[in-house]
Amino acid sequence: DAKTTQPPSMDCAEGRAANLPCNHSTISGNEYVYWYRQIHSQGPQYIIHGLKNNETNEMASLIITEDRKSSTLILPHATLRDTAVYYCIVRVGPNNDMRFGAGTRLTVKP
Amino acid sequence: DTGVSQDPRHKITKRGQNVTFRCDPISEHNRLYWYRQTLGQGPEFLTYFQNEAQLEKSRLLSDRFSAERPKGSFSTLEIQRTEQGDSAMYLCASSPGGQAPFQETQYFGPGTRLLVL
């Protein structure tokens, strides 16, 4: 019962920006948007999270629309090592778990 | 490396045997989570500890599964009488514990991959 919708797969050319969309149309005011990625056979890796404002860190940028119904994760200069499944997760309080959906499989091509 | 660690990384067992996995969270993280991930799916929540107290259990956690965190540090997940359907990646995550749970980032370990023959 994930509350997000993501495309199942995307391709990106190496060195270009990868823009991964996520729809969360039922999000409410106090719910956070988290992004994780999972490289084959490894545990999920935290990327970034946000509530209302756009966020940027050393890995990525997170753009959240003003109505908060969708967001985009931006990897500014994708490399082959960014090939992974990317999960967009809406954190619902007071539940303590992370509700993962199927994610987007990003393939970065040379 | 001060991340979450899990042991073993891989386990092959025969149906009916018992297995135990260990998770060492990030030092001083009060919250610890167990998830299960089957092939092609995202991780699914199993259970959650605040210090040594087990506060939540998913309906996925059948009677054959038990988890402990005896001293509020490392945790163990035991599966009794394993079945082929238990084959999955078992993931552990931890978070600091200073904010409401849903406001905290969870940091995941590398997982233990279980294969039941």
Image (tube, coloured by chain):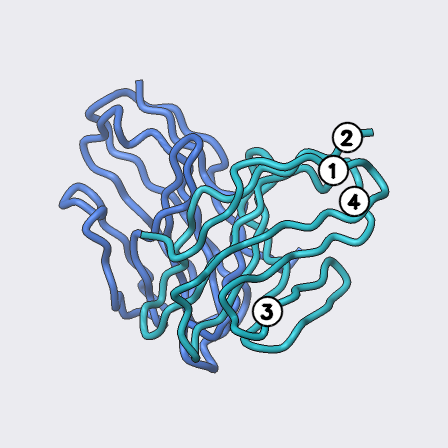
Chain colours: A cyan, B blue
Q: Position of residue A107 (x, y in %)?
A: 68, 34
Dot placed on the residue nearer the N-terminal end, 3 or 1: 1
Badge 3 amino acid: Thr
**Residue toward you, B18 or A18:** A18
Amino acid on which disc 1 is placed: Cys
Q: What distance separates the C-alpha of mark 1 from that of mark 4?
A: 7 Å
* Structural crowding at the residue carrying mark 2, measured as other residues with C-alpha within 10 Å and reported as few (<14), some (14–19) or many (≥20): few
The disc placed on residue B23 is none
Q: Residue furthest left?
A: B63
Determine which residue is flagged by label 3.
Answer: A65
Task: Identify the disc placed on residue A78.
Answer: 4
The residue sitting at 23% across, 22% down in the picture is B15
Secondary structure beneath label 2 = strand
Q: Which residue in the rendered view is the most extreme toward the top?
A: B117
The residue sitting at 79% across, 49% down in the picture is A17
Q: Quadrant of the C terminus of chain B?
A: top left
Q: Chain of mark 2?
A: A
Query: Label 2 vs label 3: CA separation?
Result: 29 Å
Residue ID for mark 1? A12
Please tell me whether mark 2 or mark 3 is closer to you in this view: 3
